Amino acid sequence: MFSKLNSPLKIKQEIESVLKPLPKDVPMVQAAAPQVSPGQYLKVVRDRLQIGMREVQDASEVIAAEEGNENFYVSAARLTQIENEESIPSFFKLFSLCSIYGLDLNDVLSKYGVNANRTRSYQTRFLPDITRTTSSEIHGLEDKVLVPVRIDPTFRWETTQLVNRVVAMWGEIPAAFLLSCNPRRHTYGYVGLTDKSMFPLLRPGSLVMIDPERKRVIQDGWKNDYERPVYFVELRNGYRCGWCQVEGSRLTVIPHPVSNVPVQSFSLTTEAEILGQVVGVAMRLAPPNRSSQEPGSKLPGPTEIVR
């Protein structure tokens, strides 16, 4: 059965060939082609792969068995509903279909109106006071970002200037391309608005880049506070960002002396784990306008959620 499967790129090209607009010399009956529903899209993919419904059912049975969850199973009758009716499959069944068809799960989710990247626009609105990790993953091959393509030749590198005014040309590239250019995958963390443990070195609200390969705590060798390594630590009840010292199985998290935050000690075996060293930071020099943040610094209660 799986010998019939083509690569995702070829599938995409074949689907686009089916859905591509007609040539200019062909008279148009309608102003716009009818929009293909997510179920119809999945049916087009299955037909192009020449996979029968029973084959999908059998393959999903294998996935369900290996995952140990019968929710991954997609019967032929359920697949008929998904393809021909306005029936939204569960996440488990969508996982199985994407696995069998060789599709990107987040790309298919977007066809059902769920943009995984949109979660980032809400992350700063809910629980902004809490220090936590944040995802650097970019979902969706079609998402694009603006990058400087050509710098103004009159730009003087020794002076401080606005980047917007020295870029002669901006261009768009797929965001996924940037991931393939990264020589190393980093983790990103967010310093909560009430976390002043490393102030003023790291201001509350900072976004930090964490190198997960640098987990060994360096005990000496720095000349000043700016050179001393800062580590991102996961605890049972949250995260801490600070200088660290290890003695045996005890980890001591040391805050900046100006912050007035107490020093804390944890067990490395049961209470704390070093996620990595902070190697980059993006932070505000002025505090954010808290009054403009909706709904605030806490998750809304059940009565506050608009359904």
Image (cartoon, rainbow, N blue to C red):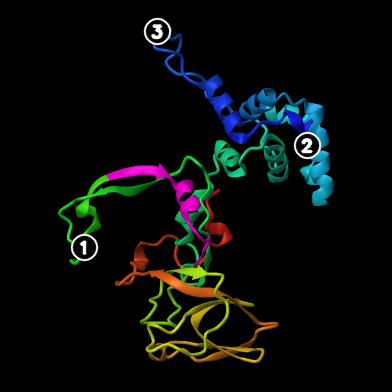
* 203 drawn magenta: no
Residue occupied by mark 3: 25
The residue lying at 30 percent from left, 72 percent from top is 285
Res. 59 image quadrant: top right
Count neighbours of disc 3 (C-alpha within 10 A) and say few if under 14, some if 14 to 19, many if 20 or more. few
Please state the extent of the stretch shown in magenta in the rendering.
Answer: 170-188
Which amino acid lies under the numbered mark 1 shown in the image of this protein?
Trp
Disc 2 vs disc 3: which is toward the camera? Answer: 3
Q: Is residue 63 left or right of residue 47?
A: right
| Residue 214, x across and y down, in percent | 54, 74
Q: Earlier in the sequence, mark 2 or mark 3?
A: 3
| Residue underneath mark 2 | 74
Q: Secondary structure at mark 1?
A: loop
The residue located at (79%, 39%) in the rendering is 60
Compute the Cα span from label 3 to label 1.
Answer: 53 Å
Q: What mark, if any, has residue 27 been given in the picture? A: none
The answer to whether any part of residue 167 appears in the image is yes
The Cα atoms of the two marked residues, 2 and 3, are separated by 43 Å
Point out the frontmost of discs 1 and 2: 1
Q: Which residue is mark 1?
A: 157
Q: Residue at x 35, y 66 (%)?
A: 291
Comparing 122 with 221, the one in front is 221
